Image (cartoon, rainbow, N blue to C red):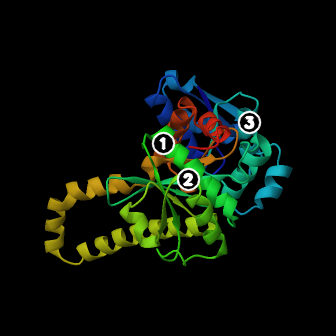
Amino acid sequence: MILAVDAMGGDKAPLEPCRGAIMACQMDSSLQVALVGDASKMSSFLDEAPAEVRKRIHLVHTDEFISMDESPSVSIRKKRNSSMRLAMEMVRVKDAEAVISAGNTGAIVAGGILVLGRIPGIDRPGLGVPIATLSSRVSLLLDVGATVRCKPINLTQFALMGSIYMKSLVGVSDPTVALLSNGEEDIKGDDVVLQAREMLKASSLNFVGYVEGKDVPLGTTDVVVCDGYTGNVLLKFGEGLGEGVMNLMKEEISKSFLPKVGLLFMLPMLKKLHYRFDYERHGGTPLLGVRGTVIKAHGRSRAKAICNALMVARDFVARRGVQTIEDELAKGGI
């Protein structure tokens, strides 16, 4: 299986994408990775790779890339030789099974639509992120940035794709679906949310109504649906809160001796909690609704996260993720 990586995308490119590719190829001996970017910058980072691994990593040269602050639709159209666009073209012509990028989210979405096209029956794609919760359940939150402003039909289609994803690809037998709103009562929500609620109530999905922001970390439902603006704010708030709590703990521990002693006993538990909520463990998330496997990694991704994003791509391809969603939509949903 060949996977294409936008090696120039992300805050730590191309170093971390290169190292992530090495890690992934070490984990899976059947994997091949095409690193798309400036070969002169990437080649030195591959010197540390074992010979057996290095022969499965291919460099696709281009000196053009899309930065984080560029206009998404303009850049993906005009920069036809950018690392992101070329990686997506590889998927379109079947030279690669999937594309992974930690780059400009808007450009990834625009590229997915422009280069790969939408699945029939889907108006706008959505990014779904698995959220580790305080319960044993993992909730899928979508959208988190692909479609900033939504119509009721977009939210309904997100719910459908999220339910298909959780059932067919994660193994949840009858996924519950909820709309994120500003209250649990039926009268809450703006016009878009209210109309989406009525559409979902009339659907065959296991729709359980509204959830509030406080319910998301509690894991009260399998799929949480919202527009991309709200989802992105919620996701970034959660990341910031986690980092803030950790920094406060470090600050308090450094002030006196007793907390340091207590930390020794708490260390195993803290390591387990860190593993459970570590975004790098999930690596990346699929752009649902386009006719190709596109995995968006966090802009700050280091090698571990890129490696895990490659594993997400590998598994999504192996489980026929795109085809499964397309087939279920063609049957009228689930």
Q: Is residue 247 above or below residue 178?
A: below
Counting other residues with Cα less than 10 Å from the Cα at mark 3, is it few (<14), some (14-19), or many (20 or more)?
some
Q: Is residue 302 above or below residue 22?
A: below
One can see residue 62 in this view: no
Q: Is residue 242 above or below residue 77?
A: below
Relative to 228, say whether 47 is above or below. above
Give the Cα distance between marks 1 and 3.
Answer: 39 Å
Q: Which residue is mark 2?
A: 128
Read off the residue under disc 3. Answer: 61
Q: Nearer the viewer, residue 9 or 93?
A: 93
Q: Earlier in the sequence, mark 1 or mark 2?
A: 2
Label 3 element class: strand
User: Can the viewer see residue 268 in this picture?
Assistant: yes
Residue pictured at 48% horizontal, 23% vertical: 29
Residue at 43% across, 65% down:
216
| Residue projecting furthest to the front | 202
Using residue 131 as the reference point, say whether residue 34 is left or right of it. right
Q: CA distance from mark 1 to mark 2?
A: 14 Å
How many numbered discs, if any?
3
Between 51 and 74, the one nearer to me in the picture? 74
Packing grade of label 2 (10 A; few <14, some 14-19, many >=20) is: many
> Mark 1 highlights which residue?
167
